[in-house]
Image (tube, helix red, strand yellow):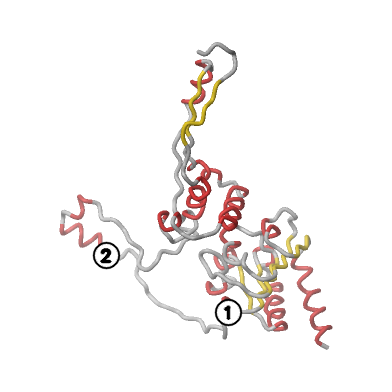
């Protein structure tokens, strides 16, 4: 130990680009691109910082553990070093199969023991899912990614009355209805209305969000909208971090008021 009684800590190594390293870990979980493609992308620093802030604020702390910084520590007790070495020192960020759509056909690996056995390999190659019927619903005219105005509803406004209200408001302003993943999963709105990393990326002139909390993957699909108005009961909802105008309130109650006001203006 050194002569003084204070711990001595020296930084001896760090990543060449710490910001890009964390950004790559964050996007890997929610992107169909490979980690190498993400790291070599031309995304600017502001965009990287915004995503990192949202991911960390959502509690996904393991992404920042990819910064491999090495320190030389001395002049500490054996009890202290035992506490340091007893904890894990490896982290993983895995592509989510819930939030990420695979590009093209989903690949799978055949175990070597099965690949060497023709009889087993034939059985392994048989698709595990059989498509019995394909039903295509009639699509509305226009895609949400082409709309100038979007009325987006989330789980907080998922009742039948609010869904009808969203459609009415969209018709009034010449826009389209959009949604978050939650209502698609519940079967209340079709997949082509979903905004986010596993849905559509939109950049409308106006994005009206009712009852959408603002999950990271949803914000990634709409944060570049020209003007965002968000309505949510939770004043801490993440959607407010990207909103130009935020209203803390019940979207189910506010939506009819907006419709009434638009109708009065149009008279």
Q: In this view, does 15 lie above or below 110?
A: above
- What quarter of the picture does the C terminus occupy? bottom right
Is 240 left or right of 82, judged from the image as shown? right
Is 245 left or right of 54, judged from the image as shown? right
Residue nearer the viewer, 161 or 196: 196
Query: Closer to the camera: disc 2 or disc 1?
Result: 1
Give the number of the disc on residue 126: 2
Q: What residue lies at 56% left-to-right and 60% top-to-bottom?
A: 217
Extreme residue in the bottom direction:
267
Is 52 left or right of 40, judged from the image as shown? right
Residue 57 place in picture, x, y as percent: 63, 48
Q: What residue lies at 67% left-to-right and 74% top-to-bottom?
A: 151
Q: In which quarter of the image is residue 110?
A: bottom left
| Secondary element at image label 2 | loop
Residue 180 place in picture, x, y as percent: 60, 66
Q: Mark 1 points at which residue?
A: 146
Residue nearer the viewer, 19 or 113: 19
Q: Earlier in the sequence, mark 2 or mark 1?
A: 2
Q: Is residue 175 above or below residue 159?
A: below
Residue 153 place in picture, x, y as percent: 66, 69
Label 2 to label 1: alpha-carbon separation: 40 Å
Residue 93 place in picture, x, y as percent: 46, 48
Give the number of the disc on residue 115: none
Q: In which quarter of the image is residue 211?
A: bottom right
Q: In this view, does 192 lie above or below 51?
A: below
Extreme residue in the top direction:
3
Q: How crowded is mark 1: few (under 14 residues within 10 Å), some or many (20 or more)?
A: few
Residue nearer the viewer, 137 or 37: 37
| Secondary element at image label 1 | helix
């Amino acid at each position: 130990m050194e002569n003084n009684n204070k711990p001595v800590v020296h930084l001896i190594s760090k990543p060449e680009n710490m910001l890009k390293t964390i950004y790559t870990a964050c996007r890997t979980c929610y992107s169909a691109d490979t980690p190498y493609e993400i790291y070599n992308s031309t995304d600017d620093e502001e965009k990287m910082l915004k995503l990192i802030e949202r991911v960390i604020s959502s509690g996904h702390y393991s992404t920042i553990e990819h910064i491999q910084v090495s320190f030389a520590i001395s002049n500490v007790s054996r009890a202290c070093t035992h506490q340091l070495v007893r904890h894990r020192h490896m982290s993983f960020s895995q592509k989510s199969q819930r939030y990420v759509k695979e590009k093209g056909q989903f690949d799978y690996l055949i175990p070597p023991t099965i690949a060497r056995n023709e009889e087993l390999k034939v059985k392994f190659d048989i698709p595990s899912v059989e498509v019995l019927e394909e039903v295509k619903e009639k699509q509305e005219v226009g895609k949400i990614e082409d709309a100038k105005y979007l009325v987006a509803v989330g789980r907080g406004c998922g009742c039948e009355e609010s869904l009808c209200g969203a459609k009415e408001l969209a018709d009034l302003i010449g826009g389209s209805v959009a949604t978050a993943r939650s209502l698609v999963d519940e079967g209340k709105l079709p997949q082509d209305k979903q905004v986010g990393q596993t849905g559509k990326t939109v950049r409308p002139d106006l994005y009206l969000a009712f009852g959408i909390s603002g999950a990271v993957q949803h914000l990634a699909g709409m944060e570049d909208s020209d003007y965002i108005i968000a309505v949510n009961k939770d004043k801490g909802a993440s959607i407010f971090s990207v909103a130009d105008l935020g209203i803390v309130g019940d979207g189910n109650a506010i939506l009819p008021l907006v419709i009434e006001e638009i109708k009065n203006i149009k008279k």
